[in-house]
Image (tube, rainbow, N blue to C red):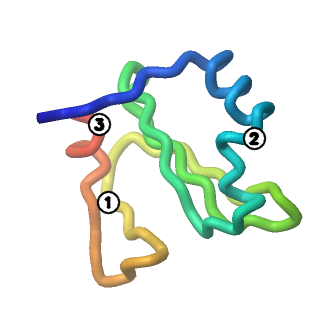
Amino acid sequence: MKTLAKWSVNDYHRMVEAGILRNATAEIQEYWVLNLSAKQMIVFRNPQNGKYVEKYTIGEGMITPLAFADVSVSVQRLLS
């Protein structure tokens, strides 16, 4: 069973303003956002002073999570 949360950009910004999504402030080293309609993955890494200083947008290839250096994930598979 697939479970997807669908948020608009406005929904996302409201959640950030409400303090629900404060990943960088909590020093979460990395998080991924899947934009299924655009077939893109946005990767945020390296939190500093409450903001991520690295942001990558990819649509293909493999990605390795920082927390699991021995694991590679297919970006295409996540987006399909």
Residue 15: percent from the left, percent from the top? 68, 30
Q: Residue at x 83, y 59 (%)?
A: 50
State left or right for residue 31 relative to residue 47.
left
Q: Residues within 10 Å of mark 3 (few under 14, many from 20)?
A: some
The answer for how far apart the CA atoms under marks 3 and 1 are is 12 Å
The answer for how far apart the CA atoms under marks 2 and 1 are is 31 Å
Per the image, the residue denoted by label 2 is 19
Per the image, the residue denoted by label 3 is 79
- N-terminal of the pair, mark 3 or mark 2, is 2
Q: Which amino acid lies under the numbered mark 3 shown in the image of this protein? A: Leu
Q: Residue at x 34, y 46 (%)?
A: 60
Between 65 and 38, the residue placed more toward the observer is 65
Residue 74: percent from the left, percent from the top? 25, 55
Q: Quadrant of residue 64?
A: bottom left
State left or right for residue 31 relative to residue 24.
left
| Tag 3 near tag 1, CB within 8 Å | no
Q: Which amino acid lies under the numbered mark 1 shown in the image of this protein? A: Met
Per the image, the residue denoted by label 1 is 62
Q: Residues within 10 Å of mark 2 (few under 14, many from 20)?
A: few
